[in-house]
Image (cartoon, coloured by chain):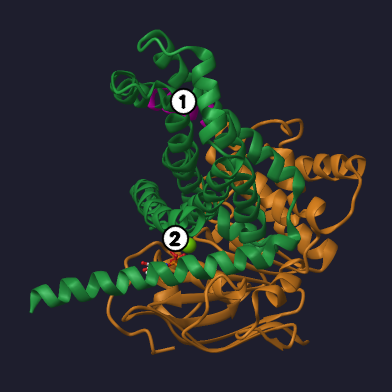
Chain colours: A orange, B green
Amino acid sequence: MSNAISIHNLTVQFGKKCILNSIDLDVRKGETLAVIGPSGTGKSTIIKVLTGLLKPTSGSVKINDEEVCCFSESEWDNLRKHMGVVFQYSALFDFMNVKDNIAFGLRRHYKVGEKEVKKQVEELLTLVDMSGMEQMMPSELSGGMKKRVGLARALAMQPDIVYYDEPTSGLDPVMTMNISKLIRKTQKTYGVTSILVTHDMESVFVAADRVAMLYKGDIVALESVDTIKNSKNPIVQAFINGQEVTGEDKNEQ
Amino acid sequence: MKVFEIIGGSLIKMSETAGGLSLLFVETLYHLKDISFKDTFKQMALLGADSLPIVAATILCTGMVFSVQTAKEFVELGASSTVGGIVAVSMARELVPILTGVVVAGRIGAAIAAEIGTMKVTEQVDALRVMAANPISYLVVPRFVAIICMMPILVVFGNLIGDIGGWGVAHYYAGISTFSFTNSIKTFAEFYDVLGGMLKSCVFGGIIAIVGCYKGLNAPNGAEGVGLATTASVVLSIILIFVTNYFLSILIYV
Ligand SMILES: Nc1ncnc2c1ncn2[C@@H]1O[C@H](COP(=O)(O)OP(=O)(O)OP(=O)(O)O)[C@@H](O)[C@H]1O
Ligand SMILES: [Mg+2]
């Protein structure tokens, strides 16, 4: 199977601090790749690079077999019309109501009529279990509700690639499971390629096909979901069992 | 050594800001082609409603005080027929455009920096970019055009208010007749005086919009970042307004 995204030797530094240290990562077409790892290891940074928000220090990134590192903003925009991003902190437009947030891309990039917009927004809101809340403003929503609106907004343009940055953090267990299933369903129905950044192992097991573990700037493990539970890698074992990772034995695979 | 470091550091920062502002200005001009008239009109309405009362209050008082300072003396000197003209010309050429600029910088420039700064630190600007909406076309262009269109309107209105204030004081405090006051305006003031002020105010509007947007888009992360961006935008745009005003006055009136 071909790769939708292929990252090679990617390095990101902020000043002298090296966040991603020459990582390699491939995402196959149509799969959901989970990226796990401790807080502050650069998971969101990977998504920023893959959406063109952050220029990497060095390395190559190919999306749909096109090298994107030297893309101009308008070239990125063409690519971004086929991407959906669920932001870690929702990033809803706070001067627009829920409906306008979700409809933003549809109205801007496709000449759809208001009737069609209304219908699609209703469907998306039902999908995230928030039907009837079109007129609410983001400031009136709880953190978890914002998350779900963010998810609906990301899926509105029927993207080919979706990046979920901790879509289930701050949700209750039932909603977490629903969202994880929704991610799975989106993948199955539309054949989207996705990257799922999460701390939540349950949702990894439900939604992902493969798991990459990021630790101190390196990908220390890349395995299928079935094998990760019994991974021999001590860092992975410690992480999924919620233990402190000890020692510097990260290269011992 | 420390002194050089500090001076060098602030020089670097200043040239960085100058470069950033120029770049944003050029990019804004380039993206004028994607202007959304709906957003622009919305901004114009907000801007007018927000700044009109303060502009009116500030300029009314200035017109009155200007008249207080001149009218009595001029009457004693037997030059009461020049008061109206002096008030109107100085209002039209300098006071109204400068005061409007300062008030709009404080009210609208600060609001722009705070609004866009909040969007920046809460990743809404990133969200715009990811949804293939260029933040310059979407956020900067409507505000830029709206301010530039509204400033001359505020200036015309300000001239009216200022002259009325000046007349009130001249008439009731210094006993200058209404006819003498208006006649004096007709003799001394030209339409060109008002036009020059309007022209200047367009430039000030451009400065306010670009500085506010630039500071907002470059707000450092965190809530205090927004505060810093807001203050910095007001200070910088007021300084730039005064400096450009000097050169514009020479260019237009000398
Ligand atoms: N603009 C920036 N300037 C400097 N350092 C940054 C910047 N953005 C991120 N960092 C640093 O990069 C590191 C990785 O950040 P990132 O947000 O990618 O972490 P993360 O893995 O998503 O963490 P979390 O799970 O908490 O969301 C952090 O240590 C952070 O301090
Ligand atoms: Mg993160």
User: Could you tell me which residue is drawn at 52 percent across and 58 percent down?
Assistant: A200
Q: Chain of mark 1?
A: B
The residue that mark 2 highlights is B218
Query: In the image, what residue occupies the spot 53% across and 44% down?
Result: B197
Percent across and percent down for residue B250 are 44, 57
Residue at 25% of width from left, 69% of height from top?
B10
Identified by mark 2, the residue type is Asn
Residue type at tag 1: Gly
**Vertical order, B185 against A28 (above or below):** above
Q: Residues within 10 Å of mark 2 (few under 14, many from 20)?
A: some
* Magenta-colored span: B50-62
Which label is found at residue B84? 1
Q: Is residue B56 magenta?
A: yes
**Nearer to me, B206 or B34:** B206
Q: Residue at x 60, y 48 (%)?
A: B148
Dot 2 falls on which chain? Answer: B
The image quarter in which residue B183 lies: top right
Q: Is residue A37 above or below residue B228?
A: below
Quadrant for ligand 1?
bottom left
Instruction: Say what secondary structure mark 1 lies in.
Output: helix
